[in-house]
Each structure stands twice: as C-alpha cells, then as structure tokens.
Image (spheres, helix red, strand yellow):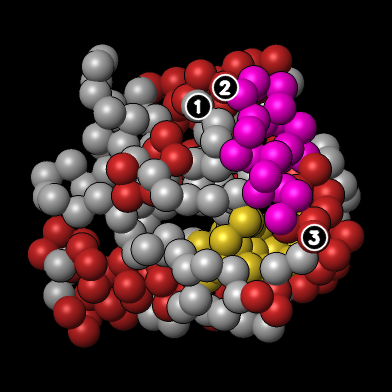
Amino acid sequence: MSAIPTDSRTVEIETFLTREASATTDEEHVQLGRDVLAWARRTYGDGLTIASSMGDEVLLHLAGTTAPGFDVFFLDTGYHFAETIGTRDAYEVMLPLRIRTIHPTETVAQQDLRFGERLHARNPDLCCRMRKVAPLNAALSGYAAWVTGVRRADASTRADAQLIEWDAKRSMLKLNPLVGWSHELVDRYAAEHGVFLNPLREIGFTSIGCEPCTRPVGAGEDPRAGRWADSDKVECGLHI
C-alpha cells in the first residue's frame, strides 16, 4: 500500500492512526476496530464496502454489531468449500449485513476448456488473477473505500499493513480494522461473543481459501501453512 495522499488525509484519519500506533491492550484494539468501522460507515455511507472470504468471521461480527447495513461482498471463485458457502448463507440471516456474491467472468468449466483442468495446480498465480483479483476489481468499482480482515499477524507480507492506508492500484482508501489483532485476540473475541465460525475451523483449517489449494494446519505450523502448501506462493494478489 502507498501513503495516503495529502488531499485524502483528514484529522479523523490522523487520530485513528495515532491511536492504533499507541494501542497496547486487547480492549483498545477491539474498540479501535469498532470506532473506525463506525466512522467509515458515517463518512462514506454507500461508498464503503467490506470484502469477506467467509474465513474472516470476526470482521463480519464486528461490522454487523457496530452498525447495520454494511455492504459486504464475497468472491465466489467456484472452488470454495461447501462449508464456506454455508457460512455466507448463515451470515446473510444472522446479522444486518447486505451480502452480495461476486463471480468471475468464466465458470470453472469454461476456464478448464480454455486452459485445461487444474490450472490452480499448474499456474496458481494466473488462476488467482482470473478468479479472485479481476472479480475483486469489478466488485470495488464505484466505491470510495473498502474494508478487509488483513492483520499484521497473518503473514510477513502483511507486516507493514496499517489501520487506514491508500490502495494506489485502485485509487481508494483501504481500512483494516483488525490490523493489530493477535491470533489470541481473534480467538478470544470469537469465544466471548459467540461468533459463528466456518465449520472448517473444527478440523484444523486456520486460514481458509479455495478447496483445491487449502489444507488443514498441523500442530506447531504457521496458521497460513495450509494455503498453497505445495508451492512457494503465499498471497493470492488481493492485498499486494
């Protein structure tokens, strides 16, 4: 991400960034997440949208219990686990969120005809570009700001993520309300608030992506070790 342009930096944004830099307790991080979501909802209204993989359940709960009517989009790659689709369906009725499902321009069958089967195994970067990145860009068209579940604790590639940053690729503001949350805080928040979790969590999935490219994580492994486990790929391209 790039520095926020001068004409887009406001007193409120500077205050949030200062608060995040000085936050030391779990309670401060939770309240900061709620406050930045409430501010963004008031400021951008229908120009704000939330990206959800249905593996970021705490983000959905935080948004849905902070203010009603958040616009949420889910990228249905055509490769999702049935449990992930079920999680989307559950959140549509459990919380006051407006969830829209975004599809790639080609079905999996159409993609297979053009590139051959199992493109995800032969060229995962191309598969992600077509089934995730391109649909994401379409989903964000017309919006002024978007919200993600990115956390610094997720991976080394996200270590520099900020609470509020500038998405230069799309010329829009990007908000990461959970950016400073630890894995322990996410788990504690979910337990204390009865957050509905993707059922895959119960069988060892700590980071949930497409079914062909995701496996459960073993004891002692990095939480994202199950993503693209047989390759050196670590990101799908949505956030870098």
Q: Which residue is depicted at the point 57% across and 80% down?
A: 171
For mark 2, what is the residue?
Answer: 185
Please tell me how crowded label 1 is: few (under 14), some (14-19), or many (20+) other residues with Cα within 10 Å: some
- Left or right: residue 141 versus residue 155 is right
Instruction: Name which of mark 3 and mark 2 comes first in the sequence.
Output: 3
Residue 203 on image: x %, y %? 38, 22
Identify the residue position indicated by label 3 in the image. 11
Q: Is residue 13 above or below residue 29?
A: below
Residue type beneath disc 1: Ser
- For the residue pair 165 and 189, the one nearer the viewer reads as 165
**Contact, mark 1 vs mark 3 (Cβ under 8 Å):** no
Res 221 seen here: yes
Quadrant in which residue 73 is drawn: bottom right
Is the C terminus in the top left, top right, bottom left or bottom right quadrant? bottom left
Q: Is residue 16 magenta?
A: yes
Reading the image, the residue beneath label 1 is 182
Find the magenta span and give its range.
Answer: 14-34
Residue type marked 3: Val
Mark 2 lies on a secondary structure that is helix
Q: Position of residue 118 (x, y in %)?
A: 17, 63
Packing grade of label 2 (10 A; few <14, some 14-19, many >=20) is some
